[in-house]
Image (cartoon, grey):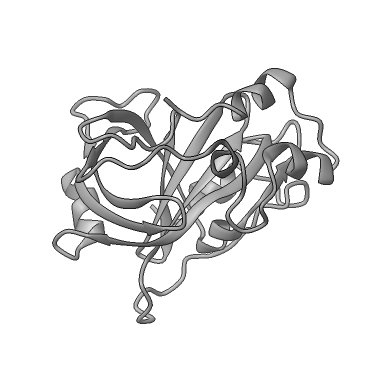
């Protein structure tokens, strides 16, 4: 898919998001994942996996599940450039995805079978995450016929052991700057909608 669709949706003279480009894979380091908490028109979490020189991306409205067998909707969206893994800030009003973005978690990941791109094509990805907040196993499964507005719909399941619930502080702070969404917004001159900010204080259930 590349980042053509990503670039077409954004005006880089207005947004601070990285334009980025597809990078050549295979530099020997572990593949990264990032979860960005995004207070747009609706609060959600963006789950991104590095593969084929880009970040394959899913919007997960309620965040990744932490109890074995629990499942959440994950809607696949356009690929993002690898530089986006470090993006934290505000997207201005009137822009695609307008709102505040926090780097909620990041780390490396592994896929069963050691073929991430092949797993995406087959529609089943068995993951092990090694993050700062999330550590353990999850499984992404593409839903048959679940195209909702042209975007493939997946389910993400917690496999392996349950995780302990995160503290309120961990839930509401960035892993790279220790800021809350409110602090990121205010430091970038953006006042968020009060209802969206109120939702950011609640851990996903």
Q: Residue 2: where, in percent of width, then height?
A: 43, 56
Q: Nearer the viewer, residue 38 or 179?
A: 179
Residue 147: % across, % down? 30, 27
Quadrant that contains the C terminus? top left
Among all residues in the image, which is located at the extreme top?
A: 195
Give residue 107's position: percent from left, percent from top: 43, 61
Direction from residue 47 to residue 26 in the image, left or right: left
Question: Where is residue 181 shown, x and y percent of the image?
Answer: 68, 39
Q: Give the residue displayed 74% in from the left and 20% down from the top.
A: 194
Outermost residue, right side:
189
Q: Residue furthest bottom?
A: 28
What's the residue at 68%, 42% (across, down)?
A: 180
Residue nearer the viewer, 95 or 27: 27
Quadrant in the rendering for residue 97: top right
| Front residue of 173 and 56 | 173
Looking at the picture, does residue 144 appear above or below residue 57? above
Judged left or right of residue 200, residue 1 is left
Q: How many marks?
A: 0
Q: Is residue 28 above or below residue 57?
A: below
Residue 188 appears in the picture as rendered: no
Q: Is residue 141 visible?
A: yes
Q: Which residue occupies 41% across, 37% down? A: 165
Q: Quadrant of residue 50?
A: bottom left
Q: Residue at x 74, y 36 (%)?
A: 182
| In the displayed structure image, the side of residue 1 where residue 126 appears, left or right | left
């Amino acid at each position: 898919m590349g980042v053509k669709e990503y670039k077409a949706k954004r005006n880089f003279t207005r947004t601070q998001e990285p334009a980025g480009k597809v990078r050549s894979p295979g530099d020997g380091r572990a593949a990264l994942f990032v979860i960005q908490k995004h207070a747009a028109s609706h609060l959600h979490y963006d789950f991104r996996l590095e593969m084929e020189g880009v970040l394959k991306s899913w919007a997960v409205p309620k965040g990744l599940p932490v109890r074995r067998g629990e499942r959440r909707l994950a809607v696949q969206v356009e690929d993002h450039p690898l530089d986006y893994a470090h993006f934290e800030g505000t997207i201005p009003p009137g822009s695609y995805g307008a709102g505040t973005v926090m780097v909620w978690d990041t780390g490396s990941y592994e896929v069963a079978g050691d073929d991430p791109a092949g797993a995406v094509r087959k529609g089943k990805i068995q993951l092990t995450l090694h993050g700062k907040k999330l550590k353990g196993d999850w499984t992404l499964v593409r839903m048959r016929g679940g195209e909702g507005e042209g975007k493939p719909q997946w389910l993400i399941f917690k496999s392996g052991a349950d995780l302990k619930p995160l503290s309120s502080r961990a839930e509401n702070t960035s892993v790279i700057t220790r800021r809350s969404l409110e602090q990121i917004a205010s430091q970038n001159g953006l006042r968020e909608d009060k209802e969206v900010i109120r939702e950011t204080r609640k851990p996903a259930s």
